[in-house]
Amino acid sequence: MVRMADIANAANVSVATVSHVINGTRPVKESTRLRVEAALDAAGYRRDRLARAMRRSTTETVGVVVSDPTQPVFGQMIQGVAKEARAAGYAMMLASSADDGQQELEAIKTFKEHRVDGIILAEVSHDLAGFDEMLRPDSIPLVLLDRLASRRLDQVGAETVGPMKRIVDHLIGNGYDDIAIVAGDLSVPTLQERFEGYRQALDAADIPLRSDRVVDDVRTEREVRAAMRPILQGNERPRALVTSSTNITAGVLGALHDLDMRTPRDVALVSFDELPYAEHFAPRITSVVQPAVQMGEHAMRLLLRRLRNPDAQARTIRLKPRFVHRQSCGCPAGAPSPFGD
Amino acid sequence: MVRMADIANAANVSVATVSHVINGTRPVKESTRLRVEAALDAAGYRRDRLARAMRRSTTETVGVVVSDPTQPVFGQMIQGVAKEARAAGYAMMLASSADDGQQELEAIKTFKEHRVDGIILAEVSHDLAGFDEMLRPDSIPLVLLDRLASRRLDQVGAETVGPMKRIVDHLIGNGYDDIAIVAGDLSVPTLQERFEGYRQALDAADIPLRSDRVVDDVRTEREVRAAMRPILQGNERPRALVTSSTNITAGVLGALHDLDMRTPRDVALVSFDELPYAEHFAPRITSVVQPAVQMGEHAMRLLLRRLRNPDAQARTIRLKPRFVHRQSCGCPAGAPSPFGD
DNA sequence: TTGAAAGCGCTAACAC
DNA sequence: GTGTTAGCGCTTTCAA
């Protein structure tokens, strides 16, 4: 690699002048500047961000931890972060945690060793040990994405309770009064919130909450699939289902397939989170869609703001999801979307 | 951050000794070692990879460029790279190129500024300017993923011609003799190869290649959707379709939906590349599935090998895709998979 | 078995 | 308007 010293030699100036030409950090006589720029060009000089970071103690790099980059929603968040990072001249380091608190901590430590300026945690494990340490004000700037925690932290998520209530309301408005929720692991805060939306919708409609209509403590697609089979069989089955995440929806679809059941004919379905390419496939599932790309963008912007102003007050941003009205909720075909989009 | 010098002070040794204790780079007397380790622990020392990289001129970081992280197949590749990188103690920088040669070059330059040890290009733009420069032996180690180029480079891809031929053979074996291919942009090498597989299958079956059965020069899902409508209308329509990528398949599904057509009833369909969660949805599309995670793993391993041995001979790895036999190809239900899986 | 010190490439304080 | 130089935190050579 060609260094500043080489350029300085070629242009007959000091390294200081070269540095100032490159960074525009102090006035340089026109003729000198041109000479330096010519030398820079001729040599194909590229700055060494390592040395620069060393000296300035800022790497202009952010670390992003996601639980699973193969899930489209995380790909979208990554995309959003990457876009804003690039615009601000930041590089992005990425690590995958497999939703495991241990690996997540590991990744954070590695990021710190690399002296990233800040960290974005897309879907922090809810059981993250050493979480308190992150709250220490002298710790590295941190933004939480998707799964939120303390309001003392910068964080970006989607609205959950309201939208979930709204799609359950929609089912109720369609005449369903026996609605089950496949809620997933209720110790996860976001899933807990989605359940809360369901609860509120039933409450508002004076429908009693029945524990045999709440499928919780299921984590994987496979578990959901297995758990749903007995529930969907027989005449006692619920007439409508609400699902709380992509994987859960996938598991439910698996169970429906196993039983050769159709939606909305045999059971109505609405889903929080959408499966990719969902618009092309049957069943066409009425869904709440999180604006994942924008969430990533906001997270990066929040981090940049914090880097510029370390003492800024912590901010929590909740973005509105979109409602996509399709057929699985059992509305008459061609009916206008009750969601106003 | 606590520095080595602090540890050296605390343990009453020189920084050299601290360094050697941490890295195990020279024998240290047991008692000294214990004292240093105690001090390390007490202070919660974490090494500074920046300073280390500065001195050793290796960052133990790799750069990955993908064209679009929201596409599951790239998420999978990223996952594979991340896993192997972590196992080898490497950090991963990620940039998204939007399949644009300009942004791709930009990302590569930024990576070089950050002095990454090597770069993985997942789906290099086929029009990448300055490509020759990468072939220069003094350039930074590089591995191509998915879209391959010169055999003088390390690269990892999936087999294409053979598998494509095989699924077209499968259609032919099912009695279809009027098969169209939705080939996408044939200036993209991987898509060109897939087309070649189609051509070979027709050739082997003595079916003439008709230019009105080749839909090329379509790039986006939207373009495919629009282009397919006239082709699918009327009685002259092909009886079977082969699609060359996820986006193309999505566009075809859109067109089928627009025309209220079903597969395999109105037209049979097989797809190269699979849409995520495809197993849960109708139509259930017979597909060739690339082992994207393993491709990512191999790419990282190839890069590590090159870093250890810069003079190793360039290697091209082609992984076998899986065949997933479903209903869209029009085989009788319950027929055994002709693919032997 | 250990320590002193040079130096990786840059930025910025200070001097002229 | 420009140059000299200390120093960021580490690794590693040389010397003891």
Image: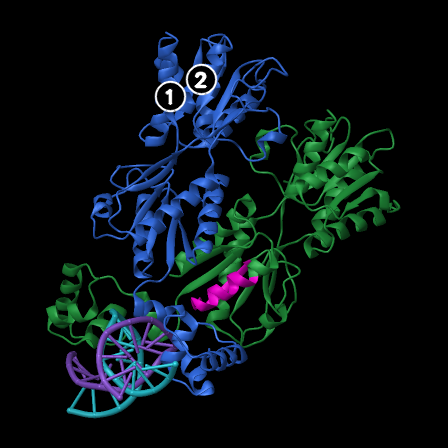
Chain colours: A blue, B green, C purple, D cyan
> As drawn, is A183 to the left or to the right of B271?
left
Asked if residue B110 is among those painted magenta in the image, a careful observer would answer yes
Residue denoted by label 1: A197
* Tag 1–tag 2 contact (CB < 8 Å): yes
Q: Position of residue A30 (x, y in %)?
A: 46, 78
Position of the C terminus of chain A by quadrant: top right
Asked if residue B77 is among those painted magenta in the image, a careful observer would answer no
Is residue B184 placed above or below A282 in the rendered structure? below
Identified at 40% across, 57% down, the residue is B87
Identify the element where label 1 is drawn.
helix
Nearest the camera: A5 or B4? Answer: A5
Q: Amino acid at mark 1?
A: Gly
Label 1 in the same subunit as label 2: yes
Residue A281 image-quadrant placement: top right
Q: Chain of mark 1?
A: A
- Report the span colored magenta: B105-121
How far apart are the two marked residues, 1 and 2, measured between alpha carbons? 8 Å
